[in-house]
Image: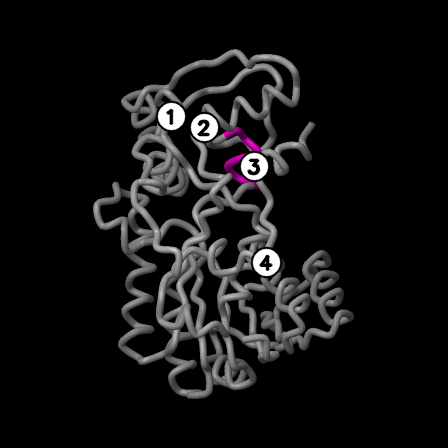
Amino acid sequence: MGKANKVLVIGGTGYLGKRLVQASLNSGHDTYVMHRPEIGVDIEKIQLLLSFKMQGAHLVSASFDDYQSLVDAVSLADVVICAIHQILLQLKLVQAIKEAGNVKRFVPSEFGTDPARMEEAMEPGRITFDDKMVVRRAIEEAGIPFTYVAANCFAGYFLGGLCQPGFILPSRERVTLLGEGNQKGIYVDEDDIAAYTLKAIDDPRTLNKTIYVKPPKNVLSQREVVQIWEKYIGKELQKTVLSEQEFLAVMKEQNYAEQVGLTHYYHVCYEGCLASFEVDDDQEATKLYPEVRYTTVEEYLKRYV
């Protein structure tokens, strides 16, 4: 631990990916950022890549459509971190890592609910968990050293909207509680997810294990999140309760992609799937890395006041 690695981030201009790149640079690692050759005129992506380059990152042109370029890219790195949305595309990456033979740790694109605990998940949202398990099996069958990161709920999506699907800014007037709003969720600042991930990549304690990011002060129900916001704005919100049956009826009227996302809200907010089991200290990021100061829910919500 502590030795600088050569870290390749794939998906490094995305919502979480750019934070992983920054965390790698902040940690002093020799950082490589893979990007597609055909960026076109996406000026914001170009500017972001250039900002990484100015901080010392190496830009690597490669594509999932060009297998040899993928092998060449992973050959540059000791550690590969992936943060792409197309989960099954990673099967090509697994093959490339196996062929290159030099990668000491692979962190696949997960960062949410642990898919190994979601065998009973509802359709159609379970496809996300099923696909991640397909990738996990491929990694393990290939004998690639790995760390899986289960980071629970992205704060920007859940806290910003007071745990309401389709909202990313907190209302000062009203809120819809999912069920009674009493199921516990776990909310993590995306920058903290990246920081803990980069801590884990060369830690022998996390080799071939799943680590969970479960900040103790951030294990809260929707109702508790709302109460923190009400304290900040000095008033009570008008509350409406959306029953489980009503939520499922609304969900069925949405398109496929929206149904997938809403299924995840259902498991978190109606079933309490994230906080329904205990995590051993040697698999929990805030216990493994107490030197990382995480952002609490109170601190996160304060920025919206």
**First reached walking from the N terminus: tag 2 or tag 1:** 1
User: In which quadrant of the rendered image does the C terminus lie?
Assistant: top right
**First reached walking from the N terminus: tag 1 or tag 3:** 1
**First reached walking from the N terminus: tag 3 or tag 2:** 2
Amino acid type at mark 1: Asn
**Label 2 near label 3: C-beta < 8 Å?**
no
**Label 4 near label 1: C-beta < 8 Å?**
no
Residue at horizontal 61 percent and vertical 71 percent from the top: 33
Amino acid type at mark 3: Val
- Pinpoint residue 93: horizontal percent, then vertical percent: 42, 74
Which mark is on residue 222? 2
**First reached walking from the N terminus: tag 3 or tag 4:** 4
The secondary structure type at the circle numbered 1 is: loop
**First reached walking from the N terminus: tag 2 or tag 4:** 2
Q: Which of 151 and 93 is in front in this view?
A: 151
Amino acid type at mark 2: Gln
Q: How far apart are marks 1 and 3 (CA)?
A: 16 Å
**Label 3 near label 1: C-beta < 8 Å?**
no
Q: Name the residue under label 4.
A: 291
**Label 1 near label 2: C-beta < 8 Å?**
yes
**First reached walking from the N terminus: tag 1 or tag 4:** 1
Magenta includes 161?
Answer: yes
Magenta region, residue range: 156-162
